[in-house]
Amino acid sequence: MTDLSTLSDEDFRAEVRRFIEQEYPPELRHPRHRLHWEQGRAWFKALRAKGWVAPGWPREYGGLGLNASQQIILIEEYERHGVARLPDHGIVMLGPLLIRFGTEAQRQRFLPRILAGEDIWCQGYSEPNAGSDLASLRTEAVLKGDHYVVNGQKIWTTLATDANWIFCLVRTDKTAKKQEGISFLLIDMKSPGVIVRPIINLALHDEFCEVFFDNVRVPRENLVGEPNKGWSMAKALLGFERIFLGSPRQSGYALARLKLLAERMGVFEDADFQDRYTRLRLDLEDHKALYETFVAMLRRGETLGPDVSMLKLHQAELFQRITELMLEIAGENAGLLEPMGGNGDLHPAGQFIEARPTTIYGGSSEIQRGILAKNVLELPG
Amino acid sequence: MEEDRAESIRMIRDSAAGIAPRGGDRRRIRELRFREPGYDPAMLRQMGEQGWIGLRVPEALGGAGLGLRELCALTEELGAALVPEPLIPAALSAVLLTAAEAEEPLQQMLSGETLLLTAWQEAPATLEAPGHAGAPRLFIPAAGGATGFLVPVAQDGRMALRLQQGGAGLTLERAQDGGFLGTLQPGEGKVIVADIGPALQDALDEAALATAAYLLGVMDQAFALTLDYLRTRQQFGRPIGSFQALQHRAADLKIQVALTRASIDSVAALIDRGDAPPAARRAAVSRAKARAADAALLVTRQAIQFHGGIGYTDEADIGLYLRKAMVLANAFGSAAFHRRRFAADAREDEA
């Protein structure tokens, strides 16, 4: 295997492109929904054969050890080609957390199985009554002898049906201030008492699930870090991945669909449409410019501040505005369940619906605005 | 006189609520979704028995002889309950059969024995029916349940109405609200009137206004559900409706609902008075439909946002309202179409 760290950024980008073009299944470009594990298996096998499963992990743990700049290039190229995200919570979230906060025994036990695709992880954070107010979560883990006994419910667990392990934030101290009684626990989903129920979403797809825990016994050694430190560990891990929630990818793809749709509907040359389209286009160009300033910070090795919330907020709302204009110009096609016939992946109703949750998940727009007001603008209250 | 009118509108609302209550459960709606024909034919017959299909048909011909204000009150209630039965398309055909003096098919329609759907549309987002004989007719709502079609066909400068029995040449597409939109390749049919005259455009305008009222019901009920949620959903130790950012947005939505209601009421009253010139009537209908389309999409998509994650699940009823708005916002003319038509007709009216 080439030592990628010796490659120039340009050569690395070329290498990534070559790899995607050779190995990525063309029919999976720009998929409409998150892929289930089975759908993405061929791509995972290709990644595994090339040793590219975990680009951000250090080489000593089987990762690629890419620097920030190279990781950004990798993701840019994935986005450009419409490469789907696999069920990747083990790679993106858990791996880095274990590397930073886990014991060596936990690393040796779990990391190789993630790289081999033997363990598929999902993330159990949100609960029915702890969404935007995540720290109020109530799924509790009570230590009895050498086991924790877990009771409660998680929701919006992405692709839990595909996973065999779940990492959870659980309450281990009900007397402490709410952020301070939370621990980070790894739970084998085959344990008795774990039930997964898929939730059909507005796109009539089943990527989110509910996970129920009824007296689930979890060995004590599955706790990561110290008890009651789970919140700060999880927060520390909201690393530079946050920037990708603000990536211009979704809006860029949607804007291209909008143009094709407008041409199909015969309104592209209308002065009114041109004004509105151009407004969105300029919003996208400026978004890219803003995004690049944050990317440049990462390349310089700086950490992101709370102002990165601007990116996610603006991207999500821009994506929505683009799809709203799609609905407006699509006529009765705006109400169709299936894509419009013909070329160009035109499905205004589908794209409009896909854009809905972007202002809800990953910190809703209301939460992001609150962060900007309090932590960036330092307004009172 | 005005008191009688208010009473008849109240009665219509009450009888609508008897069949399809606003707050009723949406189980029936869900059971009918995505299964042909997408509605319950027995329920449509019941609506016929209530006199709703013939609401605008004169009493002498077996209709109820009521005005547009009553029709809009009715369709608003149907919208609030997300009723999937094609009452607006059926009422449109009944009005056309009346204008065509086609007594027998009219009586069969009114009793619910047959469902003739008007296959007028040749392009998306429009309310114009050019009547090209061979052009496929698009986006026919509830088409899977039709026993036949009324097809306007332009001949020698006149607009004939053909009655085509059966479903030959029909294909169906599933819609977001669980209904089916049909495309009809027109075939042989019997000409039931050689010149329907301006009655076709007037009837389409009525259907557009009735659709605006249906959308008003959709947004009004979606807004009511959302306010309930804002009052009860707790985060950070308080109801989320206590957060000022959400309060302000809710207040803005209230204004849009109120504007839509005022627009529809005033337009229906204007047309019921019967003394407005055609251009003024058209402009008025366009004003109401443009408002209703934009407001319904705004209110229902904000309703999803207010509901958070649960709003993005199919099992939450609020999504049914968004889907309905997506299907009807551009039906009988999109907002952009109606703004253009308003600009043209209002100019003519002012001239």
Image: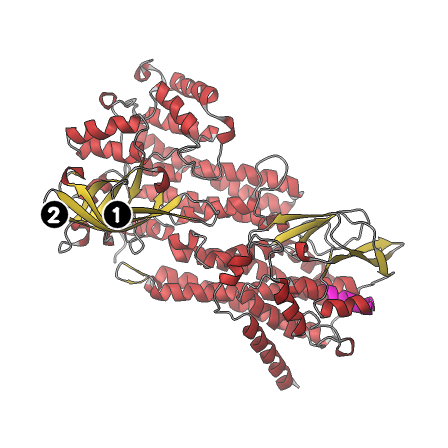
Determine the residue positioned at 51% across, 66% down: B220
- Magenta region, residue range: B93-103
Q: Is residue A201 above or below residue A8?
A: below
Question: Residue B221 location in percent, x, y?
Answer: 49, 66
Q: Quadrant of the C terminus of chain B?
A: bottom right
The residue labelled by disc 2 is A144
Q: Quadrant of the N terminus of chain B?
A: bottom right
Q: Which mark is residue A193?
A: 1
Determine the residue positioned at 39% across, 39% down: A246
Q: Is residue B338 visible?
A: yes
**Chain letter, disc 2 residue:** A
Q: Is residue B264 above or below residue A32?
A: below
* Secondary structure at numbered mark 1: loop
Residue type at the position of mark 2: Lys
Q: Is residue B174 magenta?
A: no
Q: Quadrant of residue A88?
A: top left
Q: Is residue B100 magenta?
A: yes
Task: State left or right for residue A66 relative to residue A288.
Answer: left
Asked which colour scheme the image uses, the reply is secondary structure
Residue type at the position of mark 1: Gly
- N-terminal label among 2 and 1: 2
**Chain letter, disc 1 residue:** A
Question: Residue A137 location in percent, x, y?
Answer: 24, 52
Most common SS among magenta residues: helix
Q: Quadrant of residue B290?
A: bottom right
Determine the residue positioned at 36% across, 28% down: A72
Q: How many marks?
A: 2
